[in-house]
Structures are given as structure tokens and as C-alpha cells.
Image (spheres, helix red, strand yellow):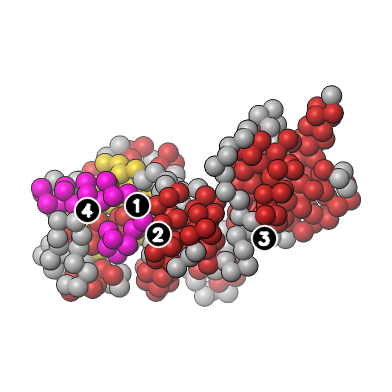
Amino acid sequence: MRFRDIIGHDEIKRHLCRTVRQGRISHAMLFTGAEGVGALPMALAYAQYVHCRNRTDEDSCGECPECYRMQRMEHPDCHYIYPVNASKEAVATGRADEKPRSEQFVHVWRRIVPETGGYLTEQEWYAELGIENQQGIINKNDANELVRQMGFKSFEGGYKTVIVWLPERLHEAAANTLLKLVEEPPERTLFLFVSAEPERIIATIRSRTQTVALAGVPDEVIARELVVRKGIAPERAAQVAHLAQGSWGAAVRMAANAGGVQSEHEERFIRLMRLCYQQKYLGLFDWAEEMAPLGREAQKQFCTAALGIVRECYLTGIGMESIAYADPGRERFCRNFAPYVSHVTVEAFVAEFERLLAQIKQNGNPRILFTHFAMCVCKIIGAARVALKK
Ligand SMILES: [Zn+2]
């Protein structure tokens, strides 16, 4: 990965290059950013820049043996740690360890990271591992193995880099082992942590790292790059960029979706809102029945997609003229529903989603959760209707 492969964040790239040129390399860094903004690609590009033999002032060369091996994710001095898990079936049938290590899934990692340019979400990763409904974890075994690896000299005589993707998934024992390494790092070793939820990393590790915080990528940058890199028509690129809300990863996925930018999840939410508006209670039960069998991760994705629509309805209602809609149907929907997603009700909507999300995470019974959620949304819309009639 090179800096030029990353969308936006030019100032951060310049800063990182400068620190390397000036020999001010910090031994523990924390790259933070919401999913899809590019925190993992940034850490990968930085690691490659450190390893590269022919780097320029602003990027690695992409051609030297070090770059070559970094790009194939096979550099012997670069170690990767990420959350993993084995499917319950695989454990039950003895095909997998109960506490697997990152290394056991490195073939998947080496394929999917280059394929996505590092714009990989946690859920996509779990889907690749075949554990959509489980959460990954970084086990103590992984940390122990790292300690062992760190005991060796670097193969190439340069830096050793350790990239820890999603340290918020570190098991406590693993975190403590890793903490010792970070506190007393072997010479010429770089720890690069990459987190989407830095507040959930144990404080002792967080406090020993230098943070590089990536904000959302501006809409106009996403739109421009969709045109340049993906050949998307400018008008559609602008629409997709608006919906992506700063996430290049999300923008690419939406642009690749040939059937239009409205996802199945968005369709599900729009259907729910219509059922609520029409007060079709039996329809609400059917809707919940349809939601229940989806995997936990798909249910979480539904919440994210639906919240995006709630936000658009709200923006429409308060007269944000700059809003760009996915398609005419979506615009019609947002205009129709904007009165029900006002400053009075928007907090209630968000609260319902937060509760639903929390309960999904706690493994609540999905049939009950979604029935209850549908009823609550229906109540909010009902109350808004009454208020509007007055
Ligand atoms: Zn190079």
C-alpha cells in the first residue's frame, strides 16, 4: 500500500513522511477513524514507507523488494494481528481451535486486504472468515507468539513493524502481554494500532501511543476520486459521495452496486415506515418475522443504513438545500416523511435504534426485538401524525 492509494488525508500523509525523514519515528502509534475513512490503509502505507529502500519525500517507491513484499503482505519483518474466531461448527467438529491465532487466517488476510485496498470493515472481515454472527477476538496466544517473534532480529536489518488491527477486540490477557511489549519495546520496533473505536481500547495501551486521527473524507474528494479511479459518471458520483458520509469504503461499495444505491436494508426500512404510516399492524409483524432470521451483523447493518435515511429525512425537513438524493424515489420518500422526522421526533428515532443495536449485541431474541422496535417506531409516527393534525 502506498500513500497515493489512499483517498484524501493529504496533510496526514505529509506529516507522516516528514516524521520518517526527520528520524522522529514514534514507536507506538494509534491510527483512528470511522470505518471506511482509511485508517488501516494509512497504517499499511506508513509501514511500507518505513520499510521502503527508495522512498521519496512523499511516498514509498512501490518497486523495491521491501515494497514488493509489503504489498503482498508477506514482508518477514511486518507482523499482523487482527481479531479472529472459528465458526462454532468448525470447533465442534474439531476442524478448528477454540482460540485461533491471526496467523491461521493469514491467507484470507493476504487476499482481502489488497483486494479492498485496506478499506475493509470489521463485518466484511468476519464474513470472509465465515463467522458473520460472531465477534472476533485477539487471543493471548497471538500476543504470546508476538513476544516470541520480537525476540528475533529483523530479517532485513531494518525496522520491525507490528500492525494491530482493531485493538478494541484484544482479550484482556492479550492486552496485558502486548502492553508489556509497548512499554519496553525491543529496539527498532514499531507498533501501529488501527482502531475504529479508540475509546474501547484499554487506557494503558492507548496512553502510550501517539494518535493519528482520520476524519471523514470530504464529499467532493470522494466524488472526484469516484470519477477518476472508478469511472463513475460525475452526477452519480456526487450522489454516492453524499450518501457515503465520509467513508470511501462505503462509497466504493455503493458505486459497485449496479442495481442502484438503495440497498436492501434501506428498502426494508422504507417499507417499515410506510407500514407505520398506514398503521398496518399485521404488516409490522410480518416485517419483524422477516428481520428476525437475518444474521446479527446484517441486523446491525440494517440499523446503520436506516439511520442514514432518518438523517436524510431530517435534513430535508429542516430545508438543507444541498442534499443529494440517491434517486427520485428516495427523494419522494424523504419529502413525504420529513414532517415525521422533525427536531421533535428525531431523538426518539435515534434512541430506538440505539436500544435495538444494544439488544442485538446482547444477543436478544430477534423476533421480539424487531417486533418491539416496529411497534415503537409506529408509536413515534402515530404521535407525530396527531401533532401535525393539530
Ligand atoms: Zn520501495
> Could you tell me the amino acid type at mark 3?
Glu
Taking depth in this image into account, of 86 and 82 the one nearest to the observer is: 82
Q: Nearer the viewer, mark 1 or mark 4?
A: 1
The region drawn magenta spans 1-23
Please name the residue shown 61% across and 51% down the image: 325
Q: Is residue 3 magenta?
A: yes
Kind of element beneath mark 4: strand
Q: Label 2: which residue?
A: 225
User: Which dot marks residue 190?
Assistant: 4
Q: CA distance from mark 2 to mark 4?
A: 31 Å
Direction from residue 47 to residue 220 in the image, left or right: right
> Could you tell me the amino acid type at mark 2?
Glu
Please name the residue shown 67% across and 49% down the image: 331
Direction from residue 139 to residue 386 in the image, left or right: right
Q: Nearer the viewer, mark 2 or mark 4?
A: 2
Taking depth in this image into account, of 154 and 172 the one nearest to the observer is: 154
> Could you tell me the amino acid type at mark 1?
Gly
Q: Are marks 1 and 2 in contact (CB under 8 Å)?
A: yes
Q: Image quadrant of residue 4?
A: bottom left
Q: Label 3: which residue?
A: 264
Label 2 packing within 10 angstroms: few (<14), some (14-19), many (20+): some
Q: Give the mark, 1 or 4, whose residue is nearer the N terminus.
A: 1
